[in-house]
Amino acid sequence: MLDVKFVIENLDFVQEALSARGQRIDFSGFTDLSSERKRLLLSGDELRQKRNAVSDEIGRLKATGQKTEQLISEMKSVSDRIKEIEVKARDIEERLNSFLLVIPNIPHPSTPKGKDSNENKEIRRLGEPPQFDFKPRPHWDIGESLDILDFERGTKIAGSRFTLYKGTGARLERALINFMLDLHTKEHGYIEVLPPFMVNRVSMTGTGQLPKFEEDLFKCKDDDYFLIPTAEVPVTNIHQNEVISEEKLPISYVAYTPCFRREAGSYGKDTRGLIRQHQFNKVELVKFVMPDKSYEELERLLLDAEEVLRRLGVHYRVVQLCTGDLGFASAKTYDIEVWLPSQETFREISSCSNFEEFQARRAGIRYVSTGGKRRGFVHTLNGSGLAVGRTLVAILENFQQKDGSILIPEALRPYMDGMERIA
RNA sequence: GGAGGGGUGGCCGAGUGGACGAUGGCGGCGGUCUUGAAAACCGUUGUGCGACGAGCACCGUGGGUUCGAAUCCUACCCCCUCCGCCA
């Protein structure tokens, strides 16, 4: 969420920054509401001051047995006026809030201007695409013929966009999760957490999924719980409404969770295979940092995520999202895209973002500087480290052999009892 | 699910209508004393809004009663104990 005061004082800047996202937002009512709110708060304070003083006086007069009827009836009307003002102020506060809650974050100056993903900027490419002397098959073919992925039965059990992993397939998914968690905890200094996979409305609002994107979420309608679309939600909300002292920052968490997404509006896209599922596994990196450190921390987080692909030896590239492709809460985002031979294209496998204060303000996550002089909102960051299902897809496709088997990357073999090949 | 007991400052804990933003203790910070430290003693020590002044708000959360609410009423949330059920 943006700061009311900042928006009021920098209206032109804010409007221009948001128009780069392709959003035209009308702030005309907003400034009026804000000044009306200020007026109400001021007159409410004045009346309360009077009431407090006179009420004290009434107490004193009563103690000495003097008459107070006159003052009491005066204060009765003052109290009524205070109540009226409070009702109005609450209403305006709510309207201001619901307006601001659906306004996206302001892009960082380094975010390239552009209207959609075609205008994202490639930052670097690593590794080489594998060369095949045969036509590489898509992962769903490979998975079915090796009997490690069962799409039909996944659909039978739950519905479309659900998959059953079997045997070595299930094992490979678990190996990837463990490999990623070990890498980030043992070598990159992240603290492992295993959060709830369902969260309440407040947490969803804190990270920005609500109120605007409710239709993307699976909801338990009788309980007002939501299935998490990413570990970002429960993990960022670990420190909801907390004040963290500067010495403890940065805090880095890594969490494995399944993720649940309705994928509304993606009908017809990626209908085959594991790429787009209602339920998928992800290892997520989340950081809480001092504001002046957040951009260097974003670079480190990105490298931490990339390291997974480097160890696996898979070709990938890093792109920076342009303003039009940027997520709602993000100021700056890098996507890591992995090479998929069957599609001869790069597909997103990680998204690493700096949200600056945007989530911290919504979720009430503050810092206090050493010595207690400065206070403010921390910056939050997160990134996939990585999307596990898509990593499995990348392995099946990039390490497929002519005979239909899959060569297991060396980094994973310790997690597969030394197995070298899936055949 | 049933019965009962609770939620107060960093922590413990007092406070049942006005003198309470809140006694006291612990912890923290500053000082006196000491070669230094400990002990002892003195002082200080919440957050937000605000011209950073005056002032206002905040005692789990939201409503309500009252001239006046941490205190009374009400709904909800959370924690603890016992019973039931359960991995």
Image (cartoon, coloured by chain):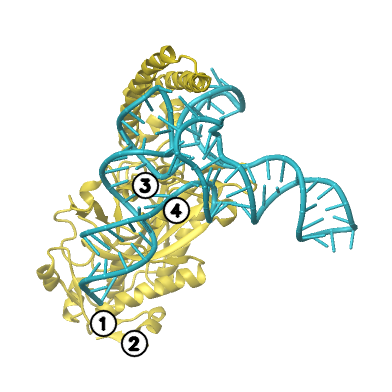
Colour used to depict chain A in the structure image: yellow
Relative placement, left or right, of B4 versus A46 is left
Whole-percent x, y for residue A60 in the image? 53, 21
Q: Amino acid at mark 1?
A: Thr
In the displayed structure, would residue B47 be above or below residue A389? Answer: above
Query: Where does label 2 land, which residue?
Result: A419
In the displayed structure, would residue A99 be above or below residue B82? Answer: above
Q: Nearer the viewer, residue A103 or A332?
A: A103
Relative placement, left or right, of A271 versus A311 is left
Q: Are marks 4 and 2 on the same chain?
A: yes
Q: Are marks 4 and 1 on the same chain?
A: yes
Residue A423: image quadrant is bottom left
Q: Are marks 1 and 2 in contact (CB under 8 Å)?
A: yes
Tag on residue A239? 4
Whole-percent x, y for residue A337 in the image? 34, 60
Q: Amino acid at mark 3?
A: Gly
Residue at mark 3: chain: A
